[in-house]
Amino acid sequence: MRLGNGRRTLPGILLASSLFCTLLTGCSGGALPPAGSAGLYRTVPSLGAPYPGIMLAGFFGFGGSKAAEETTAAATATAVTSAGSYWAPEFRDAVYRAEKTEGNEQVRIDLSSTSEGYVAISAKSEKRLKVQIKKGDIVYTYDLDSGGDPSIYPLQSGDGDYTVAVLENIEGTKYAGLYHTTVRVRLADSFEPFLRPSDYTPYKQNSACVKEAAELARGQTTAVGIVGKIYEYINASVIYDQQKAREVKSGYLPDPDETYATGRGICFDYAALAAAMLRSQGIPTKIIFGHVAPNGTYHAWNMFYTEETGWVTVGYEVSKYAWNRLDLTFTANGQDDTFVGNGTNYTDLYCY
């Protein structure tokens, strides 16, 4: 099968008015980041119509080789349709396996699932802890629970050699290493990091928001149709929480089920809920942090991948073989088609 190159620019949801920036006050506090390809159609003859699969367009928009894309496509799990209903691919979880860890008496690191796009870490200390994951010049730094509860971190920088280090606060902003290790990552599927839960979008197969996503997907026959249903649901169900935006602290992590239950959240909550719902239905979805013009507002939004073209909502047409921008914080708060555009006022900084 001949595959597209995944490099097209695409329409996205834009901020077109400085007035709406007032809704995002506190986004930078609630979405504080660490410092620091095209498709496959698979038909199951007995089940009917083909359903588009997925393939990596590239980290932060840089495409890979066609050979690499074809390898990814061959390994990608796809969904199929039957009698007008949607079948999601097998749920992709992310778990900590204590019996497969390495480390010392304070730090345990599970590298058994790097091919699935993540690393799991547990550590104990009376001081603040951080995790640093580095591949080449790309460095992501995260907070780590110091009570021993496992955390899941994505390996979003693709195949290659990674260094994973756990750091302990010694004073002020100074940290000392407790343990580090290196691992050569070869992803089973280039989309793996964007199809699984992590600390930035925690969910389970039985999560309420996942069950809702499955209901919304029922009867849909395309990925774009599912995105549209989830888009409409979050637009109608979640409002921006001004008080939370004012009070949120650095290091905040979202709970998609809480956002789903309360119907309130900040930009990070919108992005995490959308990621949980879309990923659970087999649609690769990134959480992106960056700046939005004209005021340089620090913000969080999503990018999802589809090899189809179609309309998610009036005025917003997605491109096939591409990562498509979706900013629910803006559209869910009463904005209209004037906030749809080509994405040129967005600057992507971090990807999860």
Image (cartoon, rainbow, N blue to C red):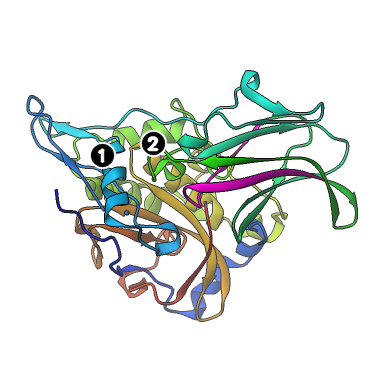
User: 11 or 306, which lies in front?
Assistant: 306
User: 165 or 256, which lies in front?
Assistant: 165
| Lateral position of residue 164 relative to residue 20, left or right | right
| SS at circle 2 | helix
**Which numbered disc flags the more N-terminal residue, 1 or 2?**
1
Residue drawn where x is 28% and y is 60% of the image: 6
- The answer to the question of whether label 1 and label 2 lie on touching residues, with beta carbons closer than 8 A, is no
User: 68 or 7, which lies in front?
Assistant: 68
Residue 349 in sight: yes
Residue 214, x across and y down, in percent: 32, 33
Residue 144, x across and y down, in percent: 72, 41
Residue density around tag 2, few if under 14, some if 14–19, many if 20 or more, within 10 Å = many
Residue 48, x across and y down, in percent: 8, 31
Residue 168, x across and y down, in percent: 83, 44
Residue drawn where x is 26% and y is 53% of the image: 38
Residue holding disc 1: 74
Can you tell which quarter of the image residue 172 is in? bottom right
Most common secondary structure along the magenta stretch: strand
* Outermost residue, right side: 171
Q: What residue type is labelled 1?
A: Ala
Which span is picked out in magenta? 150-167
